[in-house]
Amino acid sequence: NAGVTQTPKFQVLKTGQSMTLQCAQDMNHNSMYWYRQDPGMGLRLIYYSASEGTTDKGEVPNGYNVSRLNKREFSLRLESAAPSQTSVYFCASSARDRGEAFFGQGTRLTVV
Amino acid sequence: GESVGLHLPTLSVQEGDNSIINCAYSNSASDYFIWYKQESGKGPQFIIDIRSNMDKRQGQRVTVLLNKTVKHLSLQIAATQPGDSAVYFCAENPGAGNMLTFGGGTRLMVKP
């Protein structure tokens, strides 16, 4: 049982480049989330999807877009990367409203 | 692993002692709380949760206490082991959809 799988694990981008972070879960969860984690800080919610076909902004959505492709997959796109987006990105999923969230292993993104 | 939590508050305990990690939450409307453990290079892992209709919940070697009057949450770890060394986050759900809001985290270091 893989749980939540994120790709890639590491990525270096130049300022202005675009990329998509992929996330897939195999637990048949309805809700999925994207968080970023900066040194010395907790996780901050970027976007979430309560169910297939819906997405909502979290605390720090600027500079990002998301797509809930189907129930399993939730991708995060950076259209024009900036150094301030250097961070570790975590995808998570949960089975029910306000239930515990299961996290992937993270994507470490560096924008130079 | 990634440089998560370079500037986090640190709790240092002797192996075998009990650990108490504290968290102050911000939203009086929050009715669901989770403690997560994050080891270096990994995503957060669920430890224990508690709903606001309870003030105490016990798991294996862990106990969560909730004081709604002062908006305070604590995680007690009995007989702390080297494998407990990690960063610990509390998270609250303020009832707005499925969003979890994370605290800043505490690094637990266990001395042999």
Image: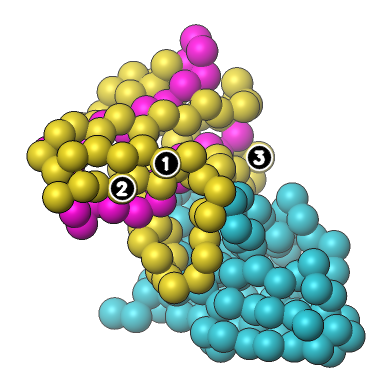
SS for tag 2? Answer: strand
Q: Colour of chain A?
A: cyan
The span shown in magenta is B68-94
Answer with the quarter of the image where residue A19 lies.
Answer: bottom right
* Kind of residue indicated by mark 1: Thr
For disc 1, the chain is B
Residue bearing the label numbered 3 = B96
Q: Classify 10 Å Cα crowding around label 1: few (below 14), some (14-19), many (20 and above).
A: some
User: Is B91 covered by the magenta stretch?
Assistant: yes
Lower sequence index among marks 1 and 2 = 1
Name the residue rendered at 80%, 73% in the picture: A83
Locate residue B75, reporting x and y percent: 32, 33
Q: For chain B, what colour was chosen?
A: yellow
Q: Amino acid at mark 2?
A: Met
Q: What's the mark number on residue B110? A: none
Task: Determine which residue is flagged by label 1.
Answer: B10
Q: CA distance from mark 2 to mark 3?
A: 34 Å
B97 in relation to A75, above or below: above
Q: Disc number at residue B109?
A: 2
Same-subunit check for callouts 2 and 3: yes
- Foreground mark, 1 or 3, reads 1
